[in-house]
Amino acid sequence: MHGMENISMLYNGLRWAVLVIALSAPLSTQAVAPPVPTFTTMEGKQIRLSDLRGKIVLIHFWATSCGICLVEMPDLIQTYQQFRKRGFEVIAVAMHYDQPGDIKAYVRKQGLPFPVVFDQEGKLASEFNQVGVTPTTFLIDASGRRISKTVGIIDFGKLRAFLKSADVEGR
């Protein structure tokens, strides 16, 4: 029994040592910011979300196999063309299960005017709350905050009304 007491005392001593070390470690006074995604377009161009501050950004997760995505794409193109000069940006993120050849063919056929990214490894989907369903759309305000998430078809009437009322830099 005497050996068990020694083990128990050693265990308790180690617990206290770990606690003392943890409490004596310097605490940072700065908050740790969440990672800022970097998007790489299918052409290899890097877009950092932080570089788009001052603009309203719509991040649209989609797939060529998603019927709803394809139905709403013309409205997304029209909205982008209508508001891009007022500081509205769109980044279309094709899901990891899509095929690069299918994405490129669709982009070419539809003439998508905004950057298209292939999330080949699913990292962007993970960074955006584990996106698994398409379409999923995030709206990011001019200060870089995510202000909405839409799973399913976008309400373009509401989106356009918001963009008309938003005070966006670059008008």
Image (cartoon, helix red, strand yellow):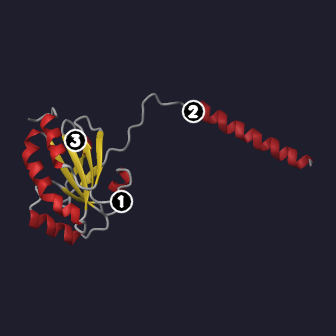
**Sequence-first disc among 1 and 3:** 3
Residue wearing tag 2:
25
Cα separation, mark 2 vs mark 1, equals 39 Å
The C terminus, quarter of image: top left
Q: Where residue 6 appears, x then y in whole percent? A: 85, 44
Q: Which numbered disc, 1 or 3, marks the residue closer to the eye?
A: 1
Q: Which numbered disc, 2 or 1, marks the residue closer to the eye?
A: 1
Give the residue type that dot 3 points to. Asp
Q: Where residue 68 appears, x then y in whole percent? A: 22, 62
Q: Where residue 61 appears, x then y in whole percent? A: 27, 56
Relative to 56, is 118 above or below?
A: below
Give the residue type that dot 2 points to. Ala
Residue wearing tag 1:
132
Q: Where residue 91 appears, x then y in whole percent? A: 20, 52
Q: Which mark is residue 51?
A: 3
Cα separation, mark 3 vs mark 2, equals 34 Å
Q: Residue at x 87, y 44 (%)?
A: 5
